[in-house]
Image (cartoon, rainbow, N blue to C red):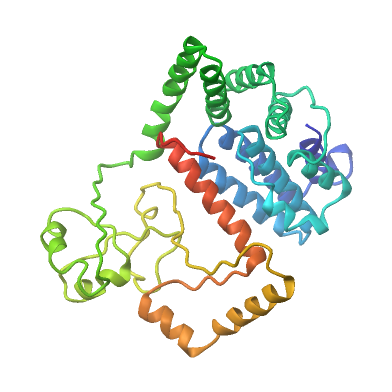
Amino acid sequence: MRILLLFSLALLPGCAGGPPPADWQLNSRQALNSFQERYLRGDTRAAEIEFERAKAELGSTGKPELLARAELVRCAARAASLEFDDCPAFEALRRDAGAEEIAYADYLTGRAQRAASDDAFSRLVFAGVQFKSGRATPETIASAIEIASAQGWRRPLLAWLGVEEKRAAAAGDSGRAETMRRRIKLILNPLRSQAFQPSRPIEFVVHSAPGGGSDVFARAVAEMAKKKPLLPQPQDVNAHIAAGRMRPIAAFTEKRLAVLPAVPTIREQGIEVPIIANARGILAPPGMGREAIAYWEDFFERLTRTPNWKKYLEENQVEDAFLKGRELGPFLEEQTALMRRVLRQAGVAVAR
């Protein structure tokens, strides 16, 4: 694949003679290769860890063009798996990317065309781009299924099997559609056990009721809390924690909460689950002018520096993570993609 070949050459200039490559070059290449394989095999968490490791190594150079190229590797893996998001992380770095990278990004998003290389990954990416552009034929779909199956790449295989199942059903080929469903079931069963079963038994009761922090858990939940764990927001149970009627045991966050610093995260306790942000923000209508956007971004940024904002964070026990529109867009795209992956792996039908 052209972009991956370029990336390898950029990271390993010392291979053709001269001094050996630096550690960051070796480490980033290894991490990106591991990311690609783990992502395609459906190991989302491990893939994310490897990609962050690659970004950390590349970031040490202070060269954004290398990060842009790495984002294309991730975008290509997503395209091969029929997960299309127009590469927002690359777009944020487009101004620092080279002509080859920009051309490849345009290819991935369907704005340009190019021929596929002979390797399996390149051919699968090509099939994904054809599908996104509405040019995929039944032969394209069959070829993509064969490629993903031969490589043991569960993530794209599930996506392409789903496409073929729908195509066969629409064509009235019930036998073919049923075959696709059996194959999907065969893949999903072990995935569910790997991705959603913790290392030890754990049972949750998720309770939500009107009334806010003063009475949500005052009556009905009181008896329940004696028997089963709950998943509340910290501010809803703060009084009960202070009174000793409830004890927090885990935070479903990437890092420990500032309001509960002694409570370990769920992952610190050896339970691997996807962490989806419970974000709060303000959205504007599409088509808002740049001047209006700049005005409101500056307004809210100044707001976050006020004493009242600090008081709001403290009283509501929420983390401060202010993002402007340019950073907020990719964040929401990543969270949406994560939610879709979680739902798909759990066997839930996702519309798009």
In the depicted view, which residue is nearer to us: 307 or 220? Answer: 220
On screen, residue 79 above or below 230:
above
Horizontal side of 179 relative to 332 (left or right) equals: left
What residue lies at 47% left-to-right and 67% top-to-bottom?
280
- In which quadrant will I find the N terminus? top right
What residue lies at 49% left-to-right and 16% top-to-bottom?
177
Horizontal side of 229 relative to 181 (left or right) equals: left
In the depicted view, which residue is nearer to us: 326 or 98? Answer: 326
Q: In which quarter of the image is residue 231?
A: bottom left
| Rendering coords of residue 158 (x, y %) | 52, 27
Q: Which residue lies furthest to the top in this view?
A: 175
Q: Quadrant of residue 107?
A: top right
What residue lies at 86% left-to-right and 44% top-to-bottom?
100
| Rendering coords of residue 239 (x, y %) | 22, 76
In the depicted view, which residue is nearer to us: 54 or 202? Answer: 202
Horizontal side of 312 relative to 282 (left or right) equals: left
User: Looking at the image, how many numbered discs can be counted on the residues?
Assistant: 0
Q: Residue furthest bottom?
A: 307
| Rendering coords of residue 17 (x, y %) | 89, 40
| Rendering coords of residue 139 (x, y %) | 68, 16
On screen, residue 128 above or below 214:
above
- In which quadrant will I find the C terminus? top right
What residue lies at 72% left-to-right and 54% top-to-bottom?
58
Q: Quadrant of residue 121?
A: top right
On screen, residue 308 above or below 95:
below
In the depicted view, which residue is nearer to us: 15 or 216? Answer: 216
On screen, residue 171 above or below 34:
above
